[in-house]
Amino acid sequence: MTQTVLPTVELGTGGPLVGVQGLGCMGMSEFYGQTDTDEALATLDAALEAGVTLFDTADMYGHGRNEELIGPFVRANRDKVVIATKFAVVREEGNGGVGSVRGMIRNDPAYIRTAVDASLRRLGVDVIDVYYMHRRNPAVPLADSVGAMAELVTAGKVRHLGLSEVTGAELREAHAVHPIAAIQSEWSVFARDVERTAVPAAAELGVAFVPYSPLGRGFLTGAFQNAEDLPADDFRRIFPRFTGDNAAANAELLAPLREIAAARGVTTAQVALAWVHQRAEVHGLAVVPIPGTRKRSRLAENTAAATLRLSAEELALLEPVADRVAGDRYADMSGTSAGRE
């Protein structure tokens, strides 16, 4: 497959220029079964060569091991790489596999100051380009959390601030304390709840949107049709959309993606990614999807989607899909923006 060199977009008003597609690095350490570390590291190099410059991690991925894994790559290419990481989810050591999605959410200023230093140390860098609050704990005033994050910018430890899984109202409140460069949430042809308030608020404020799981955690690619097909340590086994009757019903919804892909000579993954890019255009905001992959072949497939344009007729075929999806994104939606709307 011919490699695509990505165009660039500004990550929020005054933010860094990044390739219009980023790379989610979570799966290189855990959650999706066994990883070939050498291939994962080669994928990082291939991504940069293709024009991917935004690399996304978090302190909770692999209990910090994901930051350590990609740290040498970041340091070797520091003038080219925009590194984003996150704080908030506190996991107990040894809590891995399927149970690893559970944890305490901390947004208090004292924890934020400790967490950023730990991430800087694991990454081996002097400054984090984009620092996200991974999840929102409503018990902590948002002004306190964002105020502490703003102090990190003043201290030179962080360049830009981000939020993950927030409502439109929460984004506006945070942005009034300190400019937010980007917000991150699940957004795909299968998950569109963010279009209610978060996406319009981001467009209004000039905040970039960074969709995670734009391929429905691999479901939209046809890689699996039921969680029972996945390894025992794959955390997708606990997601309602991928289990039982929900999985069977949702697999049927892939028909229009397969129809478009077959007619265009592309993959369903490329159709799904092209949809995200064009949906963002409808709302008038910058978007940088971060599909995760550990393989160079998948990376080339994904980046090629950045230049794929769907017709009005093809977009119309995909329009009703999300309304028919069975099951929630998570078993517990309370920690998501949808759970606080």
Image (cartoon, helix red, strand yellow):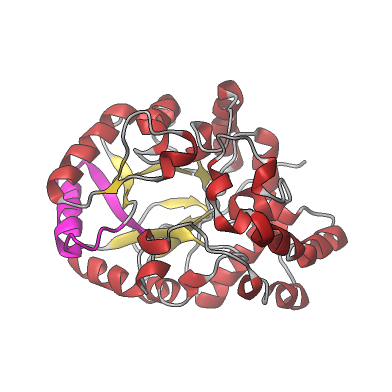
Residue at 61 percent across and 41 percent down: it is: 50
Q: Is residue 335 left or right of residue 28?
A: left
Residue 329, percent from left and from top: 52, 60
Q: Which residue sits at x=30%, y=41%? A: 128
Task: Look at the image and give the residue range highlighted in magenta.
Answer: 136-165
Measuring from the top left, give residue 60's x and y in whole percent: 36, 39
Q: Residue at x 35, y 56 (%)?
A: 15
In the image, residue 209 above or below residue 224: below
- Residue 67 appears in view: no
Residue 148 magenta-highlighted: yes
Q: Quadrant of residue 295?
A: top right
Q: Nearer the viewer, residue 16 or 211?
A: 211
**Residue 17 shows in the view:** yes
Q: Nearer the viewer, residue 193 or 182?
A: 193
Residue 131 vs residue 17, the one in the foreground: 131
Q: Residue 151 in the image: x percent, y percent?
A: 14, 50
Q: Which quadrant of the figure contains the N terminus?
A: top right
Against 272, residue 341 (above or below) is below
Residue 288 is inside the magenta segment: no
Residue 27 is left or right of residue 171, and the answer is right
In this picture, residue 124 sits left or right of residue 220:
left
Quadrant of image for the C terminus: bottom left
